[in-house]
Image (cartoon, coloured by chain):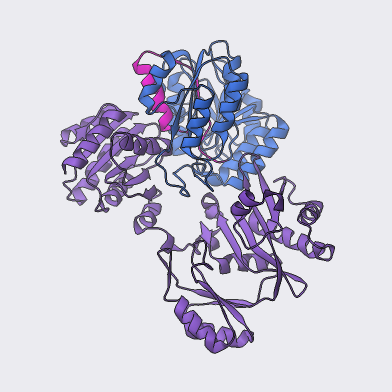
Chain colours: A blue, B purple
Amino acid sequence: MSILIDKNTRLLVQGITGNEGLFHTERMAAYGTNIVAGVTPGKGGEWVLDGKIPVFDSVRIAVEARGANTSVIFVPARFATDAIFEAADAGIALIVCITEGVPVQDMMKVRNYLDQKHVRLVGPNCPGLLTPGESKVGIIPGDIAIQGNVGVVSRSGTLTYEVLYALKEVGVGASTCVGIGGDPINGTNFIDVLGMFEADPHTEKVVLIGEIGGSDEEKAAEFIADHMTKPVAAFIAGRTAPPGKRMGHAGAIVEGGSGLAADKIEAFKAVGVPVADTPEEIPALLTG
Amino acid sequence: MKLHEYQSKQIFAKHGIPIPKGRVAATANEAKAIAEELGGRVVIKSQVLVGGRGKAGGIRLAKSPDEAEDVAAAILTMELKGLPVRKVLVDEAANIDSEIYLGITNDRAARKPVMIASSEGGVDIEETARENPKAIVRIHIDPLLGLRDYQSRDLAAGIDLPREHWRAFAGIARGLWQAYKSSDANLAEINPLVIADKRLLAVDGKMVIDDNALFRHPDLNEMRDLDVEVEAETEARKYGLSFIKLEGEIGCMVNGAGLAMTTMDIIKLYGGEPANFLDIGGGAGAEKVAAALRIILGDSNVKAVLINIFGGITRGDEVARGILEALQTFNSNIPMIARLVGTKAAEGRQILADAQMITAESLSDAAQKAVKAAKGA
């Protein structure tokens, strides 16, 4: 009952011996994610988590030895681009990059390269993926969501948690939650994920969480009108954001009068997608 | 991060783009000396990171070194859109026959750099896009391959540039691509690129550098002009905090950019005005949180503070300790409303409850309490 990750996910953690990498490896493992290997160049041969997870020097060696099919990246921004290329070249089909602060020109190279190789990247600058009860790849706190039939896709991190939490409070669960990240150029966008949710038999409804900057929400609205049969509810952050300022996320900026929250809200309403005023309102929009 | 005109043009020149002879001056005397060196007419241009310098009187012609001194003295005492003029660029004046536009920026939707040329130079490209979109030609550049020469020719032909200038134009386009690429720019723009005495010349230039790439450009990082940001924003950057000052009365400390924007939006929804955007980021430890609170409380407009932390990377107990640590160094009686949820949130809430802080369950509840506290103060 999910997209992208499930019980069959065999996860590799790039940057597993770093602070954040190790902290979240523990949490992912505790959640039940099948973590088969870690990579930190120069630390091959070590083990983490009380000798449960072997560390390798490269993704290629880790894949050969342990058959990983998904990778999550926790390495610092200056090394993240290389980590993505390394995973793609080692045959990893799904790469989830948590790292924030990857230069945008690097991401343009990454995206154009991965498109040619048909490798899926989620992120960067994202919280990752959660299929409640099955697998957690990234940093979304596992206990804030329960299994269910609502697909969640978001450009944000903590705002996504807010929505998962609001759903759980009223007993509504998620099929999969996908954090696509807050950068202007990322690996996976709204319409990619909407298409997957539409095709997933266990997803019945979808929540989309967008924000100011770019035009991905407008494209999502068009896609929903043309291709989706399942109901979608939306939330857009940044109604009070001043123009010309980057609101934390590299991609959250109103430039030259485009990327406004009001335009995105209007685009959704025009195709019959209800837009919540607060994250707490979303559960009511889904049942209403 | 925006670069000044003179900085941008120096980078352009390094990549073979012809720019007018000239130098930057911080005093009227220096401006006079530069004008003497150059001989003839010069243009005195204020170096301030705002648009519309010309219309505001910040760009003026001088026919002699003495006049250059007077003009520079006048411009150096100006303020343009609230920013002081600290430097002027003294450039040789060009005999301009015609003006075009050439720029490169990131096309988010196409996920590629886009090079834009227009037969209408000297005006804002967004204005041309609205008023006369036919004057604009765009080509996308494959980031893995770089700019191809045929693409430059296509641009030159597209804006009806006379054929005798195509070769020089291709050289400038290549230089601009190199400048954009090697500086990790989000924008590199020559406006106008002029034809003067049958030569192409980059008379004005602008670059915006990707903040996320500054780690590999320490030289560019040095060029940051701190006049364009308020002091608190400079201070916040030191601690790795993302902070934007606003005009309202409710200070916000939130983890995560999306949630920080949402917190601002909900404050407004319940009749308040946010005093700032502040994202303490992921994995924020006690020291960072303390710095964030100091910065928020440093704004005298702030009448209440809303702390909204949803724990993922950030741990609730660390946030709580940071808040208490900051309060010890900052004797403040501004009411604070805290809402912690997520990783180690229960521990964090307990720490704050023990310290007599107002806590809230939901975001709406927190926002309403903050608006009420700000109005009561």
The residue sitting at 39% across, 18% down in the picture is: A283
Q: Position of residue B361 (x, y in %)?
A: 26, 26
Residue B344: which quarter of the image?
top left
Which of these two is toward me, A171 or A22?
Answer: A171
A183 drawn magenta: yes
Q: Quick check: B238 left or right of B354?
A: right
| Above or below, comparing residue B309 to residue B101 in the picture | above
| Above or below, comparing residue B304 to residue B34 in the picture | above
Give, as a single range, the part of the protein colored magenta.
Answer: A156-184
Q: Quick check: A151 left or right of B238?
A: right
Which of these two is toward me, A124 or B39?
Answer: B39
Question: The C terminus of chain A appears in which quarter of the rendering?
Answer: top left
Q: Position of residue A214 (x, y in %)?
A: 55, 39
Q: Position of residue A154 (x, y in %)?
A: 49, 29
B371 drawn magenta: no
The residue sitting at 63% across, 53% down in the picture is: B128
- Residue found at the very far right of the displayed protein: B163
Q: Quick check: A282 left or right of B58?
A: left
